[in-house]
Image (cartoon, coloured by chain):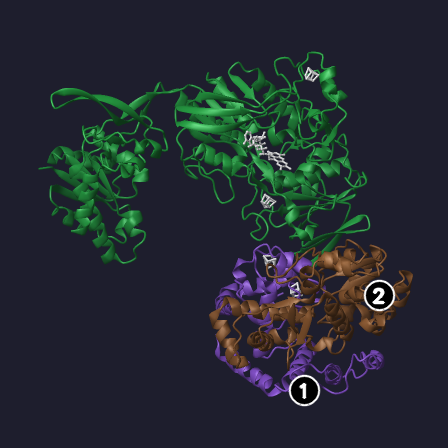
Amino acid sequence: MQPINLTSASAAGKDFVEKVRKASGVDVKACYQCGKCSAGCPVAFAMDYTPRQVMRMLQLGLTEEVLKSHSIWLCAQCETCSARCPRKLEPAKVMEALRIEAKKAGFETEDEIATFNEKFLRSVASNGRVFEAGLVIGFNLATVRPFKDAGVAPSMLANGKLKLLPHKIKGRDAVRRMFEKAEKMEGEHK
Amino acid sequence: MRRVGVFVCHCGSNIAGTVDVERVAKEACKFPNVVFATDYKYMCSEPGQQVIKDAIKEHNLDRVVVASCSPRMHEPTFRRCLESAGMNPYLFEMANIREHCSWVHPDKEKGTVKAIDLVRKAAAKVVKDEPLQKSSIGITKRALVIGGGIAGIQVALDIADAGFPVTIVEKEPTIGGRMAQIDKTFPTLDCSACILTPKMVDASQHPNIEILSYSEVEKVEGYVGNFNITIRKKARSVDMSKCTGCGTCWEKCPTKVDSEFDMGLGKRKAIYTPFPQAVPNKPVIDRIHCTKFKNGKCGICQKFCPTGAVDFEQQDELITEKYGAIVVSTGFNQFDHSVYGEYGYGKYPDVITGLHFERLINASGPTMGKIKRPSDHKIPETVVFVKCVGSRDEAKGKSYCSRTCCMYTAKHATLVHEKIPGSKSYIFYMDVRTPGKGYEEFYKRTAEEYEAQYIRGRVSKIYQKGDKLMVRGEDSLIGRPVEIEADMVVLANAMVAREDAGDLARTLGISYDKDNFFTEAHPKLRPVETHTAGVFLAGACQGPKDIPDSVAQAGAAASKAIGLLSKTQMESDAIVSNVDESRCSGCMICKGICPYKAIDAKIITERIGGKMAERQVAEVNKSLCQGCGACTVACRAGCLNLLGFTNEQILAEVEAVCL
Amino acid sequence: MKYAYYPGCSLHSTGIEYDMSSQLVAGKLGVELKEIPDWNCCGASAGHTTNHLLGLALPARNLAIAEKEGLDVMAPCASCYNRMKTSEVAVKSSQETKARVAEVTEMEYEGKVGVKSALEVFVKDAGLDTIKSLTVKNLGGMKIAAYYGCLLVRPVGIGFDDPENPMTMDDMVTALGGEAVDWPFKTECCGASLPTAREKVGLKLVYDILTIAQSVGAEAVVTACPLCFMNLDMRQNDLNKKVDNANFHLPIFYFTELMAIAFGEKPAKAGVGKHFVDTSSVLAKYNLK
Ligand SMILES: Cc1cc2nc3c(=O)[nH]c(=O)nc-3n(C[C@H](O)[C@H](O)[C@H](O)COP(=O)(O)OP(=O)(O)OC[C@H]3O[C@@H](n4cnc5c(N)ncnc54)[C@H](O)[C@@H]3O)c2cc1C
Ligand code: SF4
Ligand code: SF4
Ligand code: SF4
Ligand code: SF4
């Protein structure tokens, strides 16, 4: 294992810690590494770094490693960590902020989750609502798994749980403009 | 024409760093009546004081101003300096150019200008200062100790051994406090009862010690040296003078109640002593649970008592006594972990606290010293300890570290290993804090010889799964979630202040912190005194503490109290309120205002128009007056003045700054 | 009482039973539901983890429409509820956020109306006495584990019930004559946002929840969220195929379905026939068919 050069890492990480604080309202420096967040996190077992380690790496300035981690994509945003942190920090908000930053930096380590989210939002942007059948099919095509979850589709169609055509809302142009504006404004902000 | 000398202190770079001290001295020379001014590196030092003394002689000074720090610390120093130079110590003023100036202003120019103003103000006031004299009063040579835990017992023994009478007021039926509940004590593992009960007996047999158990302090009046204390002796329903402590009553009593002493793990009777070695070893009737008090039936204890000591009619009794000093040693409570939903809100019977564990392991406890889990009395094989519960947790508990739990948890794990062969202990910790003599070595043994597995991480969830308790944490040293199937979980709950600490503090007029622990006068230099003269602190009521620290602090508090009680007379400050009788109308508004009850009416005789006439005026008791000044603003005629802070003196200051 | 109704995407598709039963219960309780005209998707977790501002703006548009009508919103889906609540609180607590959100949505949302979950409206506000008085078919002591999921009671300090041990649904079960079993996984996350993309991770969470529910003797699980419902209901078959020894047949219900049935409606009318896991045997056992 290569030693980390903390002198340069911490100096470089300072601005990023501040960026995360602005975006999430969480001062990662206040984390005392108790691990309660990770112990309660339902998906920590599948993460490459536990939520506590994510906080630690930010403290030490290991920005790029954090942004490339799987953890920030696997986080289910359940807020269990935030509900239990003894220092009233909100790791869930940090995860949210990191995922946004990772996307900006072009790191989408969990490309399936990233693709799913993207398809989801694209569906919202064009219809105003999510078109689930389209979403699932589109997602599975994109990730080369055309038959996944296909087994349940017929019964769902019969029960009225899946629609074959998307419902397009009247205000879909307004919604699409919201996407454009939000992207532009968040880019300028900070 | 007065002759004022001004001395400006550098306080190293504390003042000189942001205030041009030389310029301040130079400017001071131009103020009216100032005949000499200088600056010096450390005015409070020996040579610094010599500079003042020399100048007094050389320049024939009759007033002195020192421009330095806050008067809190060094006003007495400089007053003594004046005294030793043959001056009245009250012909002196301090200008605080450190806290009010250098420490708060980064700009040197502005800071210097402000410092000059502050000195000008002091120089204007000092001219109006008059010589004042201290008065003195007698002292009641007797101490009151509130709370009879190990700290209170130690304080009482030390003061009593020095020859002064002591009263211990203890709210429970017996003295002993938490230490009586503890089984063995770290780091030596000697039996708690074996070292505590002899002290309890010593206290009860000491000719100078009176124990008022089942009693509480109701009212505190008076002042240092002469407190008037009203004590409520709660109705015990047992005549202490007749009872021999034979135990017949509690044997016969049919009503069983959860024992507070055993943390609800065992039972006691409605007439009871908390534990066999109780001091005094005489019972009380718990009137809430006693059948006789509930519905008039029963009365069995009274029937069987061989000495006729049971008295259902007994009433609370209020007594008022005089004391010269008070030591507060009311100890601590355990944090209530029912706020932790993730640990089951306190509803899992086998998730217990440290004090529960102490009772489980105690040979005279509810399980005769066998560690059995409360739910099904099975002997646990896997025991998980969780540290810092309610400590170091701003979200649901207290921000501070409770200091004792790292050690008592190590002790508990050791005892599990000793008592349950084949058992395994896991200890979840964030840090292991062992800053005491022999403590680190004890912790090492716990991990190495007693095979306790330490896991660094805070537990996030405890839940019941079948007859196991699932404990989820993270081993933060390898960064992986871990899970343990435990038979019992022991939480190291924080030490918190007694729930009535705030009330007691208000009764005593002492201050307390955000967590309701009583505040010492200075965290480093006056750790056992309070801001209220004559009231001292000992033990865990001041903050979390273990037994060695509580006992050490008890000794310190006792020596402070003994120091006070050994004086024959006590000097009181000269800064007291003064009545201009010629203008006083005798309305006595001031009397009601004074928080120290220092003002009373008196009748004076005076000649009006050639005739002698009697008239009522106010009079200030100089030893009771604390110089707070409340009366001076209440007096409509303005005839009350605080000596040292008269209207004339204050106005001189105002004019010096504003005109 | 009248509410602006926000079904969200799920209640018009995979959560259709929740929609059907909510309408029935509202009718019985005298709660009028007026669907928000031309509502849009709240963005779910994909929205706010991609663009923070978008995550606030998407729900705010719906809130703004409701505000125009002067109605508080009822959002049955826990995820929609959580997103709307977050947006509501953010707009109420910061002028700057309010302005930025308004710029994106091109609509004014002042924070005058807020959002409630269906559980709040149908159970907390209606009151247990009303629920008892409307009950004509007692649940007969059916052992039910109330599963709230993670989002319904969070963020902490904002939610309407305890974040670790909520009781609203348990109380409802008791009021309907069922037995609410005490269990420790009421608010554990089921990973609803994960299974589609990361199947294994999500399956484990569902497995744990169902196992614990079964171990405390639950005969059914009741939820208040379409995502939780889908996950717990649809994945059982998957689990039985993929995990050794897994054999789950645990009926999952929406709380509104149970209310509707107890209030005397035919289960089919409440959408109960559309579940993946068979519900007929447990309903038959307690004479609720
Ligand atoms: C589980 C556990 C294990 C521990 N083990 C150890 C150990 O092994 N070794 C060690 O050194 N320390 C140990 N400690 C710490 C130890 O208990 C304390 O240091 C010690 O009890 C403090 O003594 P105290 O006299 O200040 O307070 P307490 O023991 O709390 O005594 C205070 C007394 O004041 C009385 N009182 C309270 N309020 C009033 C009132 N208003 N009026 C009149 N009386 C009042 C109380 O009834 C009580 O008798 C342990 C603590 C815990 C929680
Ligand atoms: S729970 Fe809070 S303090 Fe503890 S490791 Fe996680 S973020 Fe840090
Ligand atoms: S919000 Fe994310 S990091 Fe926090 S507990 Fe849930 S899944 Fe884990
Ligand atoms: S029976 Fe009487 S003498 Fe004996 S302990 Fe009880 S009260 Fe005291
Ligand atoms: S003494 Fe140890 S267990 Fe107790 S609060 Fe401090 S660190 Fe935590």
Residue B508: give x, y in percent of width and height: 45, 32
List the residue tagged with mark 2.
C251
| Location of residue B106 (image quadrant) | bottom left
User: How many numbered discs?
Assistant: 2
- Image location (x, y in percent) of residue B465: 79, 52
Cβ of mark 1 under 8 Å from ligand 3: the answer is no
Quadrant of ligand 3: it is: bottom right
Locate residue B300 relative to residue B594 in the image: left or right.
Answer: right
Q: Nearer the viewer, residue A42 or B342?
A: B342
Disc 1 packing (10 Å; few <14; some 14–19; many ≥20): some
- Amino acid found under the numbered disc labelled 2: Pro
Say which colour chain B has.
green
Real-space Cα separation, disc 2 to disc 1, in angstroms: 34 Å
Identify the subunit bearing mark 1: A
Pinpoint residue A170: horizontal percent, then vertical percent: 63, 87
What is the letter of the purple chain?
Answer: A
Tell me the quarter of the image containing the N terminus of chain B: top left
- Residue B310 is situated, as x and y percent measured from the top left of the image, at 67, 17
Residue C186: tell me if it is visible.
no
User: Residue flagged by tag 1: what amino acid is it?
Assistant: Lys
* Picture colour for chain C: brown
Q: Toward the viewer: B614 or A170?
A: B614
Relative placement, left or right, of B342 versus C250 is left
The residue beneath circle 1 is: A168
SS state under label 1: loop
